[in-house]
């Protein structure tokens, strides 16, 4: 399956300023597959090492982190001749070996002619840097997210449909009705399947949503295990409570995170470390309320008011144990959850496009779901789960702050009217 990360990796390989690359991201998002596929396509050979399956590797890096020592040893261990510029060295699950992470500094300084990519999950929370320094300024860092809606279309061979969607987005032209309905059908399937590559692959092969749900549940179990493995003992229960509670928060009309929904009498001081762990791990995303939509947005965020979303909408449905039929056909039974689910979907698409998102509220209860900075402009984004696009809150925002334009995401076709760019939900990846 095509992943857009490939374009970045090719640019990295060809850059005269290339440094060792850290590819981070939550578990099961496709880091290892993407790197190995890239290595097979772009290099003569790949020397692959995994710190989880080969504990002896840790001892190798304990002995020395000098590239002059490591290269011949790694060449012997992998059974591959490691050649400058022609071999891709891959160190997987690097969070299990701090010394290997530190060695990247010396690869950058002493052996830049060797191409090296390291991959790891939970790098933000798993690495104890008290003994070994992080190679600040000596590495390139890229985060891989689950497959977005564009990659989902492409997995089904719908490249022409993607081209049509991009053209309509760019020119604010409505899609032909038949194509619009077809794209909405794929969007609803994406809500159920999500973007975890193994889930998408199994759905492509079998169309068996029960098998997909089983795979999603296994990913969720691995996340729970990580919460125990890479967390302090007194934070494990709190982290699991917060993660389980995200789906509850998204079911409320006001999706702002409320500590009292975790347990009676809960306070920020008790759970803020757990929320931070989930955000650093890539398992969840936190977006803050912005008090004044001005540049730079980060200066105006309210650190006490935020929303929390999970990293993949398919995993959200699995956590909530929502039947696939209820999402595919969207009956009234899901009315209380639809809004939060679709917000979560949009958040994932924006995060994949590397936006730092915020939300906005007025003193009188108006709320805009997302505020981003796009092409140097501050743009409000209103999300509707259906074709009802009466966005009163967006009108309040426009009247007060007068943005150059606003975006409305819903099931309606493309259009542009009164400064509002209407975009179908399946085209959120275009933003």
Image (cartoon, helix red, strand yellow):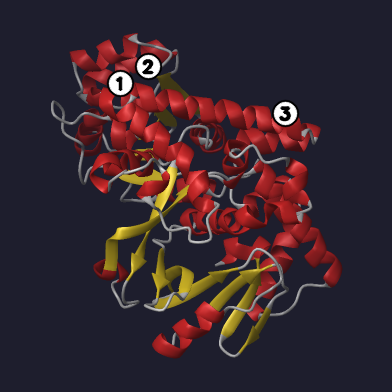
**Visible residue check, residue 327:** yes
In the foreground, 380 or 155? 380
Mark 3 and mark 2 in contact? Answer it, CB < 8 Å. no
Residue 314 appears in which quarter of the rendering?
A: top right
Distance in Å between CA atoms under marks 1 and 2 = 6 Å
Between circles 3 and 2, the one closer to the viewer is 3
Residue at horizontal 66 percent and vertical 49 percent from the top: 191
Q: Is 338 situated left or right of 247 in this image?
A: right
Residue 95 place in picture, x, y as percent? 32, 27
Q: Is 401 situated left or right of 267 in this image?
A: right
Mark 1 and mark 2 in contact? Answer it, CB < 8 Å. yes
Residue projecting furthest to the right: 178
| Residue at image mark 3 | 211
Disc 2 packing (10 Å; few <14; some 14–19; many ≥20):
some
Q: Is 136 situated left or right of 350 in this image?
A: left
In the foreground, 377 or 292? 292
Question: Label 1's element?
Answer: helix
Residue 135 place in picture, x, y as percent? 21, 38
Residue 362 appears in which quarter of the rendering?
A: bottom left
Residue at horizontal 68 percent and vertical 44 percent from the top: 192
In the foreground, 365 or 370? 365
Question: Label 2's element?
Answer: helix
For residue 71, the mark is 1
**Visible residue check, residue 19:** no
Distance in Å between CA atoms under marks 1 and 3 = 43 Å
| Residue at image mark 2 | 75
Disc 3 packing (10 Å; few <14; some 14–19; many ≥20):
some
Residue 240 appears in which quarter of the rendering?
A: top left
Residue at horizontal 52 percent and vertical 25 percent from the top: 221
Count of numbered circles on the image: 3
């Amino acid at each position: 399956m095509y992943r857009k990360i490939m374009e970045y990796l090719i640019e990295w390989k060809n850059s005269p300023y290339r440094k060792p690359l850290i590819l981070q991201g939550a578990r099961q998002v496709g880091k290892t597959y993407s790197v190995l596929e890239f290595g097979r396509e772009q290099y003569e050979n790949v020397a692959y090492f995994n710190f989880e399956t080969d504990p002896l590797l840790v001892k190798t890096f304990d002995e020395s982190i000098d590239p002059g020592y490591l290269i011949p040893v790694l060449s012997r261990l992998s059974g591959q001749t490691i050649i400058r510029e022609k071999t891709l060295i891959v160190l997987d699950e690097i969070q299990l070996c701090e010394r290997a992470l530190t060695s990247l500094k010396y690869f950058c300084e002493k052996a830049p002619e060797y191409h090296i990519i390291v991959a790891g999950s939970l790098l933000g929370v798993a690495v104890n840097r008290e003994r070994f320094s992080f190679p600040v300024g000596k590495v390139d860092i890229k985060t891989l997210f689950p497959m977005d809606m564009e990659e989902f279309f492409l997995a089904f061979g719908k490249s022409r449909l993607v081209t049509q969607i991009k053209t309509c987005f760019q020119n604010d032209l409505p899609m032909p009705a038949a194509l619009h309905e077809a794209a909405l059908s794929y969007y609803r399937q994406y809500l159920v399947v999500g973007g975890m590559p193994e889930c998408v692959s199994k759905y492509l092969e079998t169309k068996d949503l029960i098998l997909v749900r089983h795979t999603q549940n296994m990913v969720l179990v691995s996340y729970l295990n990580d919460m125990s493995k890479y967390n302090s003992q007194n934070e494990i229960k709190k982290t699991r409570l917060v993660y389980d509670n995200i789906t509850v928060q998204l079911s409320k009309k006001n999706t702002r995170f409320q500590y009292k929904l975790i347990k009676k009498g809960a306070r920020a001081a008790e759970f803020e470390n757990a929320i931070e762990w989930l955000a650093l791990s890539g398992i969840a995303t936190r977006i803050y309320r912005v008090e004044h939509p001005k540049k730079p947005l980060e200066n105006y965020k309210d650190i006490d008011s935020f929303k929390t979303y999970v990293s993949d909408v398919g995993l959200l449905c699995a956590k909530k144990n929502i039947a696939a039929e209820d999402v595919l056909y969207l009956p009234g039974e899901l009315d209380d959850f639809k809004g939060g689910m679709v917000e979560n979907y949009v958040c994932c698409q924006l995060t994949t496009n590397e936006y730092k998102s915020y939300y906005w509220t007025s003193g009188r209860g108006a709320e805009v779901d997302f505020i981003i900075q796009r092409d140097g402009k501050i743009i409000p984004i209103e999300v509707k789960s259906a074709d009802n696009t009466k966005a009163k809150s967006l009108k309040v925002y426009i009247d007060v702050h007068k943005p150059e334009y606003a975006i409305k995401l819903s099931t309606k076709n493309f259009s542009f009217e009164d400064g509002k760019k209407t975009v179908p939900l399946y085209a959120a990846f275009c933003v």
